[in-house]
C-alpha cells in the first residue's frame, strides 16, 4: 500500500489509528480515486484535530526532496507575522537562490497599507537579512486577481520544473495552492487546511500540464513560535481572519497598555505619543494608569484580560521578558510581539515592554 492522503500527504495505512495516514479497511476498500485519511476527514468536516507525534525524519526527507528537485521555490511568508515567519537561513535550508517570495495576508491590512511602500520596505528588510531571491510579490489568497498574477509569475520563472511551496506553519501555503487549483480545475479545497500546526505531514504532489508538479511541503517548524505554547482555542482567538482595525491610543507618560494578558507596555518617560495597536480584533487592549497596573494585572488576569489561560501561562513561562524601547518623532517604529501582532509608536520617549519568557519582542522600522 503506497497511496498518500490527498489532504496532508501522509502515506495511507489501515493498521494503526494513532499514526498518520490511517483509514479503516472498509473505507479503504470502497474508495475511488483520491481520498482523505481519517485525520483530514475530521479536520475538513468537523474541524476536529487528531494529534500525532511529528516525524522529524520525514520532515528532513521532505526538505531533501525540495533540494534535489532543483525547481522553483515559492517561499510564503505572513505579512502580519513577518518576523516570526521569515527565516534568515532560507537559502541554506534549501540550498537555493531560485526563490519567489510571496508575502501573504495583505488583506488583513486593506486600506492601512500602501503596497508600493510596503514592497520597498520588504526588499530593504530582505536585504538586511541577506536573503537571496528572484522576485517578491504581495498578495491575498482570497483575491482571484492576486492568484492569477501569482500563477502567471510562477509560469514565467519555473522553466518547466517543479514548483515547491515552502514556509512556516500557518502562513497559508495550502490555502494558496487550493486557490491555484480552483482557478484551473474549479475543485474547491482539495488540500486540508487548518490553524493547527503540522497540518501537512509530507510533500503533496499536484500534477501540472507538462510532467511537473506543484508541491505542498510540511511547514517549517519554529520551535520558538508562540503556537508551540498555547492551546488551539487560544490560537484561534489570537489569529486574525478579517481586516484588522487598528486602535490608536494617545498616551501620556505613566500610562500602561495591556494586550489581553499577553503583553504589558509601560510608557515610562517622554511626551504625549501615539501607540497604534495591530492585533486580532478579538484581543482586548486595555489602558490604565501605571500606578494601578500591578494590581490590575493580578486581579483581572483571568476575567477582564482572559487570555492566555492558566495552562497557556504555565507553558509560556514566567512574565519576565522585558525590552526597553526608545523612540523619537523622526521615525515611526513597530514593537513586534512575536506571533501576536505589533504596536506602531510615533512620538518621543521610552517604553518598557513586558511579556512571557517564551515570547520574543522585536523592534523594527514601522512597516505601515
Image (cartoon, rainbow, N blue to C red):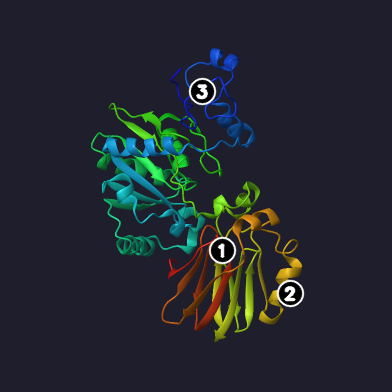
Q: Quadrant of the C terminus?
A: bottom left
Q: Which is in the foreground here, disc 2 or disc 3?
A: 2
What's the residue at 28%, 27% (across, down)? Answer: 210
Q: Residue furthest left?
A: 159
Query: In this figure, which residue is indicated by the disc labeled 1?
Result: 357
Instruction: Using the numbered discs, state the Cα–Cα distance from disc 1 to disc 2 in whole angstroms.
Output: 21 Å
- Relative to 246, residue 92 above or below: above
Decide if residue 220 is on the left or right side of residue 276: left
Which residue was labeled with disc 3? 35
**Tag 3 near tag 1, CB within 8 Å:** no
Report whether 123 appears left or right of 76: left
Q: Which residue is mark 2?
A: 295
Question: First in sequence: mark 3 or mark 1?
Answer: 3
Residue 334 percent coordinates (x, y): 47, 69
**Where is residue 82, by image quadrant?**
bottom left
Q: What x and y, as percent, mark residue 339? A: 52, 57
Q: Is residue 157 visible?
A: yes
Q: Residue at x 59, y 29 (%)?
A: 18
The CA distance from mark 3 to mark 1 is 43 Å
Q: Residue 199: x and y, percent? A: 52, 38
* Rendered position, 233 above or below 337: above
Amino acid at each position: 500500500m503506497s497511496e498518500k492522503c490527498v489532504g496532508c500527504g501522509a502515506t495511507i495505512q489501515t493498521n494503526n489509528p494513532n499514526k498518520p495516514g490511517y483509514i479503516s479497511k472498509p473505507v479503504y476498500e470502497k474508495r475511488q480515486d483520491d481520498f482523505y485519511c481519517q485525520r483530514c476527514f475530521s479536520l475538513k468536516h468537523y474541524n476536529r484535530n487528531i494529534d500525532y507525534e511529528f516525524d522529524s525524519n520525514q520532515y528532513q526527507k521532505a526538505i531533501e526532496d525540495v533540494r534535489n528537485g532543483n525547481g522553483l521555490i515559492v517561499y510564503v511568508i505572513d505579512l502580519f507575522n513577518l518576523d516570526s515567519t521569515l527565516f534568515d537561513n532560507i537559502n541554506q535550508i534549501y540550498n537555493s537562490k531560485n526563490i519567489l517570495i510571496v508575502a501573504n495576508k495583505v488583506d488583513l491590512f486593506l486600506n492601512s497599507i500602501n503596497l508600493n511602500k510596503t514592497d520597498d520596505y520588504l526588499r530593504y528588510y530582505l536585504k538586511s537579512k541577506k536573503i537571496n531571491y528572484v522576485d517578491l510579490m504581495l498578495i491575498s489568497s482570497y483575491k482571484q486577481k492576486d492568484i492569477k498574477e501569482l500563477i502567471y509569475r510562477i509560469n514565467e520563472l519555473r522553466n518547466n520544473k517543479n514548483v515547491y511551496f515552502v514556509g512556516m506553519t500557518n502562513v497559508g501555503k495550502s490555502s494558496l495552492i487550493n486557490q491555484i487549483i480552483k482557478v484551473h480545475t474549479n475543485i474547491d479545497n482539495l488540500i486540508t487546511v487548518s490553524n493547527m500546526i503540522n497540518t501537512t505531514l509530507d510533500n503533496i504532489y499536484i500534477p501540472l500540464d507538462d510532467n511537473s508538479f506543484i508541491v505542498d511541503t510540511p511547514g517549517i517548524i519554529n520551535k520558538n513560535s508562540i503556537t508551540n505554547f498555547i492551546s488551539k482555542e487560544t490560537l484561534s482567538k489570537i489569529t486574525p481572519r478579517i481586516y484588522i482595525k487598528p486602535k490608536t491610543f494617545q498616551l501620556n507618560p505613566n500610562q500602561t497598555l495591556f494586550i489581553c494578558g499577553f503583553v504589558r507596555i509601560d510608557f515610562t518617560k517622554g511626551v504625549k505619543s501615539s501607540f497604534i495597536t495591530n492585533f486580532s480584533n478579538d484581543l482586548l487592549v486595555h489602558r490604565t494608569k501605571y500606578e494601578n497596573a500591578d494590581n490590575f494585572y493580578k486581579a483581572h488576569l483571568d476575567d477582564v484580560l482572559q487570555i492566555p489561560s492558566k495552562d497557556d501561562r504555565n507553558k509560556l513561562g514566567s512574565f519576565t521578558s522585558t525590552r526597553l524601547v526608545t523612540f523619537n518623532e523622526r521615525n515611526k517604529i513597530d514593537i513586534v510581539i512575536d506571533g501576536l501582532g505589533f504596536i506602531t509608536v510615533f512620538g518621543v520617549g521610552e517604553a518598557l515592554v513586558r511579556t512571557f519568557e517564551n515570547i520574543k519582542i522585536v523592534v523594527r522600522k514601522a512597516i505601515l
